[in-house]
Structures are given as structure tokens and as C-alpha cells.
Image: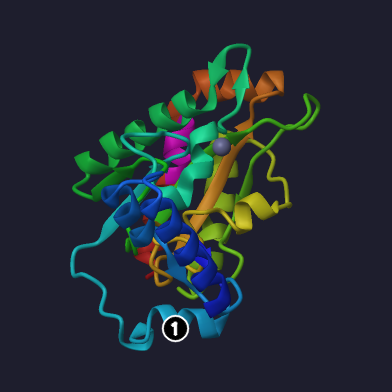
Amino acid sequence: MLIKDINHLITILTLLITLNNNHLINDAQLLDFLSEIYYQPYPEFSKEALYFRYPNFDNFQKPTTTKIAIQIGHLIEGDIPFELRKLARGGGAIVNGIKEVEINKAIAFKIKEILEKENYYVEILPAIIPKDYYADIFISLHANSADEYTSGFMISTPFIDYSGKANKLKKIMIREYSKETKLRFINKVTSNMTHYYAFNWSKFKRAIHPKTPAIIIEMGNMRNKNDLNFLLNNQEKIAKGIIKGIKLFLEKN
Ligand SMILES: [Zn+2]
């Protein structure tokens, strides 16, 4: 839970202690809630927030092993932490009984399988990622569900990118993905993409470290017949497009 100022913090603490005193939450639950409280007095994605949260940001030393992180959008594994409780409602698209998460998952594992054969180190992540997660490249896989007439894919970087590389990654990915899939690039982003929770280290603990070059990709539109057909039957091509983007980006860094 994001706390913006001291008064807000005092209100929340008082409430929690009252609940505990009245035996409405037990000690374990109290500690659980306390560990989820996140004091962030500065605006989301601001420089002040960055240095408040990561005082050593400028001296960040990246690990020596190059790691590629692929997130399966909407895949819930295990308990949902308090700060991400909204995820409990679910959220992935469902079209004709087909779940977005299943498409995301199939493609993620294809990417991993192919890249591992070429000795790349790939980590597959569910919807909830570890705290302050760093990778040399982070790609969140999704498929959207816009109107049935819209066909194409969308890519977004975080609202503000402190890795200095996300735009480059986006550009390369647009080119390689459209080359491989022949899908149209829709030059539009939504706030759900730019402020995607896993990008938002200024609001959540379980988010990428701001030095992580990250993008979210809506690989196609499930409500469009052709796109859905493509998402289900051309997963190899989709995976290849994303892999080409990944490899080119890593080569250039
Ligand atoms: Zn999604």
C-alpha cells in the first residue's frame, strides 16, 4: 500500500492497531499489512521518488550474467500480496472461452525454449514478480481485447524510463515483430501500459528495478478474428519476432 505523507501513515497505523486491539486482525495479519506499507512521499516515476527509493541508483552495478525476463501477463501463482490485491479480480481477456493468459504462457515458453538452445539465460515470471527485480531485458507478454475491427500489436515502455534503453528496445521490437508476423503496429499506448504495475517501482515493491530496460507488448487483438487466429496458430512466428528483437537489442548493448 502506497502512503503519500505522514498523516496518511498515522491514519493507517492507527486503524491497523485498533483492528488488532479489537481482535479483528491477529498479530500475524498486522505484521503482514505493516510489511506491505510503502512510504512514498513523491509523485510516481519522479526523480525525487527514484532517489528516495534508490539512493545508490547512479552507482548501480548490474549482475555479470545477462538475464532475459519474460513475464506471462495475468498468470497468478501462489498468494497475492496486499499491495497487488487488485490482481485478485483477474484481468486477462477471455474471448470465445479462450484465455489471454494461456496465449501469453504458450508464447513465453516457446521463447524460453528457443533462446535456451542458444545458451541465453531466460527467466519466466508470473504476474507477481520479485521485489526490485533486475534483468537486462524485461518483456511483459499480453494480448489485448479491443473492438473486433482493430488488428495489430502495441508496445509501450514505462511512463518514465530510467534505464535509458527502453525506447531503443521498443523501436527494435516494433521492427522485428512486424517483419516476422506481418501484423500492423498500432502507434498508441494506454495508461494501463505506461503505468503497468510491474513497471511501477514508485508505487509497488514487486516491480522492476528502474535500471531494467522494459516493455509491455500487446501481441495482437483477441477480439479481431484474424489476430486471434494468428495468436493461436502462429505462436512460433510470434516467438521468433520477439526473439529477434531481444537478440538485436542485446547485441547493441
Ligand atoms: Zn493482458
Image position of 189 (left or right of 214) = right
Can you say whether 33 is above or below 109 in the image? below
Quadrant assignment for the C terminus: bottom left
Q: Depth check: give the residue in front, 238 or 68.
A: 68
Ligand 1, what quadrant? top right
Q: Identify the coloring.
A: rainbow
In the rendered image, the residue lying farthest to the front is 22
Mark 1 residue CB less than 8 A from any atom of ligand 1: no
Identify which residue is drawn at 38% across, 36% down: 108
Magenta residues?
Answer: 237-242
Identify which residue is drawn at 47% across, 48% down: 84
Q: In x, y percent, where is residue 70?
A: 37, 46
Residue occupied by mark 1? 52
Identify which residue is drawn at 68% across, 30% down: 145
Total numbered circles: 1
Can you say whether 12 is above or below 81 in the image? below
- Type of residue at label 1? Phe
At label 1, counting other C-alpha atoms closer than 10 Å, the crowd grade (few under 14, some 14-19, many 20 or more) is: some
Queried whether the magenta region covers residue 167, the answer comes back as no
Is any atom of residue 137 visible in this view?
no
Q: In x, y percent, where is residue 1?
A: 48, 59
Q: Tell me which secondary structure the magenta stretch mostly adopts.
A: helix
Is any atom of residue 18 visible in this view?
yes
Q: Depth check: give the residue in front, 253 or 143.
A: 143
Q: Quadrant of residue 248?
A: bottom left
Identify which residue is drawn at 77% across, 24% down: 148
Q: In x, y percent, where is residue 6?
A: 52, 79
Q: In x, y percent, where is residue 205?
A: 40, 62
Can you say whether 111 is above or below 101 in the image? below
